[in-house]
Amino acid sequence: MRFTKMQGLGNDYLYIYGQAPADAPALSRRLSDRHFGPGADGIIFISPSDCADFRMRIFNADGSEAEMCGNGIRCVGKYVYDRGLTDKTELLIETGAGLRRLRLRPENGRVVSVTAEMGRAAVIPGTEGDLVDVGNPHLVRFVSDAEGAPLSTLGPALCASVPGGINVEFVQVLGPDRLRMRVWERGSGITLACGTGACASAAAAVRRGLCRPMEPITVLLDGGALQITVGQQGELYMEGPAETVFEGEIEL
C-alpha cells in the first residue's frame, strides 16, 4: 500500500487515496506507531464524493474516527492539487462534520498554503472551561501560562470526563490578536498542533471579549502559527501551511 506522509504545523497524518477499508481502525493503530510503523497522528483517506469535490475520513492513532481535522483538511487540498487530481483552487470537501470549503494558494504548481472555511462555532462558557463545537467537540481552558499547563495529566483526565472524549486546549491570551495554545487531542494525545482546536480557542476568546471578531488572530501552537478569523455570527476561517514529508510503501 502506498501512502504520503504530510504535516501541518507538525500535526502529521498518512494520506491514502481510496476508500477506507473495513479494517481502517486497526490499520491506523498499526501504521501510526512511531516505533514499529511510519508514525503519525493517524490516517486520512481521500476519495471521490457524491456531494463535493472530494471526501476525507480521519482515523486517529488509537483507531477512533474523527469528524474533522483542520490541519488535515489543508493537507487534503495540497494532496489533490499537487497530484493533478484537480486543477481547481477552490474546493468543497465532504467531512464527518459536514461540507468544508478550501481556497488553495499555489506557487510554481505546488500548494504552499490553504485557507479553510471551518463552519460556525457554538460556544458554551463554563467554569471548567468553555465547551466549543466546531464540528467536533473541544474544551477550551484559559490559563495564565500555557507552557506550564498540566497537559499530560489534566488533559487526558478532562478528555475522559466527557462521554466519547473531548479535545482539550490550554490557552494563554498574549494580546487581542494573539493566543498561545497547547492541546491534548482526543484519540491522539499531545500533538504539535490542532487546527480545529485553534478555531475553538479563537471562538472562545472572541466570545469572552478577549479577542476581536472580524480581525485575524494568530494562534501559536507547538508546531507553528495559524491565522484564525472569527466572523460576527461565529463563522471561522483558518489559514496555514501544508507540507509533504515523504512518499512511502508498506507491505500489509
Image: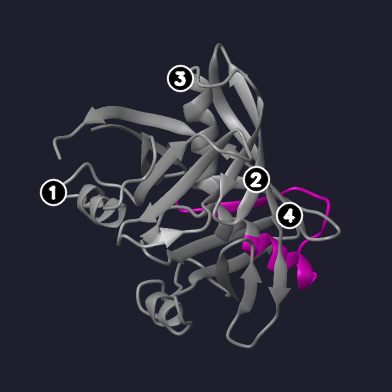
At label 4, counting other C-alpha atoms closer than 10 Å, the crowd grade (few under 14, some 14-19, many 20 or more) is many
Q: Residue at x 53, y 71 (%)?
A: 145
- Residue 225 vertical placement versus 188 (above, below): above
Q: How is the image coloured?
A: one colour
Q: Nearer the viewer, mark 2 or mark 1?
A: 2
Q: Nearer the viewer, residue 161 or 63?
A: 63
The CA distance from mark 2 to mark 1 is 34 Å
At label 4, which amino acid type do we have?
Asp
Q: Residue at x 64, y 25 (%)?
A: 105
Q: Which residue is mark 4?
A: 177
- The answer to whether any part of residue 19 appears in the image is yes
Q: Nearer the viewer, residue 116 or 47?
A: 47
Q: Which residue is mark 3?
A: 83
Residue 36 percent location from the top left of the image:
13, 48
Q: Nearer the viewer, residue 38 or 45?
A: 45
The CA distance from mark 2 to mark 4 is 25 Å
Screen quadrant of the C terminus = top left
Q: Which residue is mark 1?
A: 36
- Magenta range: 200-222
Secondary structure category for the residue under label 1: loop
Earlier in the chain: of badge 4 and badge 3, it is: 3
Residue 30 percent location from the top left of the image:
20, 52
In the shown orientation, is residue 122 left or right of residue 76? right
Residue 148 percent location from the top left of the image:
44, 71
